[in-house]
Image (cartoon, helix red, strand yellow):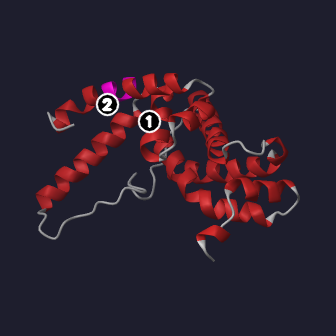
Amino acid sequence: MTPDDVPTDDALMARLQAGDERALDELMTRWELPVRRYLHRHLQNEAAALDIAEEAFVRVYQQRHRFAPGSHFTAWLFTIATNLARSHHRWRARHPSEAFPDGDGGQGDVPVALREDATPADALRRQEKIEAVRHAVSVLSDELRTVTLLYEYENLSHAEIASVLHCSAKAVETRLYRARKRLRAILAPYFGGDN
């Protein structure tokens, strides 16, 4: 199959709307991992991220007739995932309990790549910085965390993020500025002048 033969997300959604349920399988193959990574970063819980990612694709199927041809599927999908994550946060706030840690110790999708000449001390410093960044992002307000994750990790454009968050592209730019400023302040002890 050549790149020209690969159907676009819009084409797959048109097929799904026409009753071809195999199109959903193709969309899931394409987008399940990015949605799970986004949700894991947002929720800091792998099990919840997996459950909510599955629910997001259930919603894509249930709401397939609401998708407007020509709109950005990525923005629509991440809107669904973001709304489900927010609902999960609200539910957790109303039902606090002991959290079960992820089996991977929260490492999830963050590989620690070492150069061959790296020392154990280098690896430890790198891991500490990764944990510091993860923590810094997790303590941002929901508004700033969401825009940071969508832009920095999921590579959505300002326009796509604006569509997800129902705001203007200028508001996205402002939120990114505020998030970066807050992250610099939180991470200053870890990175000094190199952030």
Name the quadrant containing residue 183.
Answer: top left
Q: Is residue 128 left or right of residue 42?
A: left
Residue 151 x/y as whole percent: 46, 40
**In the rendered structure, which amino acid carries the disc numbered 1?**
Thr
- On whether residue 159 falls in the magenta region, the answer is no
* Image quarter hosting the N terminus: bottom right
Residue at 25 percent across and 52 percent down: it is 127
**In the rendered structure, which amino acid carries the disc numbered 2?**
Leu
Nearer to me, 104 or 25 = 25
**Height in image: 40 above or below 193?**
below
* Image quarter hosting the C terminus: top left
**Height in image: 147 above or below 17?**
above
Q: CA distance from mark 1 to mark 2?
A: 10 Å
Residue 103 x/y as whole percent: 44, 58
Q: Is residue 8 left or right of residue 150?
A: right
Nearer to me, 6 or 166 = 6
Residue at 62 percent across and 47 percent down: it is 74
Residue 18 x/y as whole percent: 88, 57
What range of the chain is rendered magenta? 178-183
Residue at 50 percent across and 40 percent down: it is 150
Q: Earlier in the sequence, mark 1 or mark 2?
A: 1
Decide: marks 1, 2 in contact (CB < 8 A)? Answer: yes
Q: Main secondary structure of the magenta part?
A: helix
Q: Which residue, given by chain and number where applicable, does mark 1 sit on?
A: 148
**Height in image: 78 above or below 158?**
below
Name the element at disc 2: helix
Q: Which residue, given by chain and number where applicable, does mark 2 sit on?
A: 183
